[in-house]
Amino acid sequence: MLQEITPVMLPVYERPAALAGVHTHYCPGCTHGIAHRLVAEALDELGLREQTIMVAPVGCAVFAYQYFEMDGCEAAHGRAPAMATGIKRLLPDRTVLTYQGDGDLASIGIAELIHAAARGEPFTTIFVNNAIYGMTGGQMSPESLEGQRTSSTPGGRDVQRTGFPLKVCELIAGLEGTAYVVRRSLHDVASIRKAKKAIVTALKVQQAGAGFSLVELLSTCPTNWGLTPADALTWVEEHMLPQYPVGDYKVSAAALRAAAG
Amino acid sequence: MTRELLKGNVAIGEAAIRAGVQAYFGYPITPQTELLEYMAWRMADLGRVFLQAESEIAAINMVYGAACTGARVMTSSSSPGFSLMQEGLSYIAASDVPAVVVDMMRGGPGLGNILPSQGDYFQVTRSAGHGDYRPIVLAPASVQEAIDLTMLAFDLADRYRHVVILAADGQIGQMMEPAELPPMQPLTAAPPWALRGAQGRAPNRISSLYMHAESAEAANRRIQSRLSQIRQYEQRSLEYATEDAELLVTGYGTAGRIALSAVQAAREQGLKVGLLRPLTLFPFPEERLSVLADRVQACLVVEMNAGQMLDDVRLAVGGQIPVEFYGRMGGVVPMPDELLTVISRMYRRVAAPA
């Protein structure tokens, strides 16, 4: 007698519990989706979803608080680190995240970022750097590269007139309050895996109360760069990586212990 | 309880503590700095949160974040610093989170000076930020009132989930008077909407963002409905000798207090003059003023600015009687004799013509 074979479906890939089951508004080829997923996976792995509060920025990630299945709020432009400070000071045992783009963090919000970092506020900032203002239609951000064409630098960014790209990791790594400051990229699979690991480490550093943690993620904006999604990934590799080298800019002794634990 | 000699800024800080404030975020600016300094050690002693922010912009956004956790929170500043808080205040109001902000007003515009002024009346009562909303605004005229209205501020903020501004001129912050503090209240429990981690429940989300016109209009209607309740239930004012008054003087805070001295002196001279002193600038005590406008011949508005509450008085009396204005600016505090002269002249001219 033949034995009936019951097919067994094993999930190999599913939505992390920390991601909400909603559609996002991100453009095709934008790496915000990858960044969201990595943050959600990291929170799931550490079992932190139910004790996390996320602060969303103004910019393309303005709806991030709706895309995660956890408590969240939406800050004024650039003020996420101040808002996160208020939350973390009241709830020091909770996990607090800001998720910010480069216009929000490096331009209008640089003061709030630097002071939160200098105070060693033990929350984590996910810094999505795509070298442009996405939401408002592709203007120059502090992170735009020399020569980069944007809608406000139509002839290419002239650093003599508009200043030089602002290197956030390099800038804040020297502050004593920072525990973990790293730059990663989302342009290929190997880089994405490393980015995920860095986010997990940053959350562990936060849990250990070791100080301020920031993970910068080099990201794409195919729409405003005027490139296909595939070409945008290549552009990150060829143009952004030389200007913004990935690496660990600050890993304090306490962060090292937290990462190992 | 006993009366003790207290400085206004310190009294407001201790009143906030007794009202159960769990976090204070602020930035030094004269003439409110003693409040920040007091909170620096007092909050630490009680194991509550004190943080000196890098700017008023950061301070108000720390308040916003802390308020989202459902705690009683506050900040304090003075006019130029208060200007920097406008954006954050608008977000707070639009997000339905309670917060208390002290504006110890100083001479302006611009850097102005550190002397007492009421030049922020428009700023605090009209919106205190972009968009359609008004904060609740309380105006103390003494150290005791500063204490009482600080306690009330936290209760109103929680009751309406709204921004409450304690708007005092620098004189209230700087002067010392005997006053009585209330007993220490227990800390309030976090409300169900607070952001504290979605443990065993659906996520709470706090935002002021509405992409579609209809949903943004619905959010505006929610705020307006709250404001109309506030208008209905929270108008507060004090009166002196209004029963048979021919001329009504009105002013708030220090100007209202000095006007009381002038009105009392006018009464001693046999002039039928009364005083209405608003305690709430929003909601403006328009109902009571409208009733009084039916009885008196004229109204004099006294402020330490160029005439700002004047607009609200004119709206409330609706053209029934002449409304005149006397004000000093730039940190000049009017003297009772000075006001008495203005009152006597106006009384002879409009209230009891020869």
Image (cartoon, helix red, strand yellow):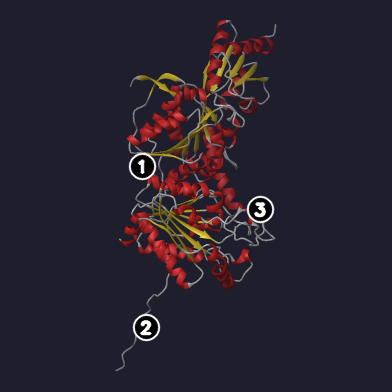
- Determine the CA span between mark 2 and mark 3: 65 Å
The image shows residue A158, relative to residue B271, as above or below, that is below
Within-10-Å neighbours for mark 1: few <14, some 14–19, many 20+? few
Which image quadrant is residue A68 in?
bottom left
The image shows residue A71, relative to residue B87, as above or below, that is below
State the SS at label 2: loop
Circle 1 sits on which residue?
B189
Amino acid marked by disc 3: Arg
Residue under disc 2 on the same chain as residue under disc 1: no
State the SS at label 3: helix
Residue under disc 2 on the same chain as residue under disc 3: yes
Could you tell which of marks 2 and 3 lies nearer the N-terminus? 2
Circle 2/circle 3 CB separation < 8 Å: no
Amino acid marked by disc 1: Ala
Give coordinates of residue B237: x percent, y percent. Answer: 52, 24
Give coordinates of residue A83: x percent, y percent. Answer: 47, 47
Amino acid marked by disc 2: Pro
State the SS at label 1: loop
- Determine the CA span between mark 3 and mark 1: 54 Å
**Observer-nearest of A253 and A77:** A253
Q: Circle 3 marks a residue in which chain?
A: A
Total numbered labels placed on residues in the image: 3
Give coordinates of residue B2: x percent, y percent. Answer: 34, 20
Q: Is residue A177 left or right of residue B297?
A: left
Circle 3 sits on which residue?
A161
Q: Residue furthest bottom?
A: A1
Which image quadrant is residue B243 in?
top right
- Determine the CA span between mark 2 and mark 1: 52 Å
Q: Indicate which disc residue A7 carries.
A: 2
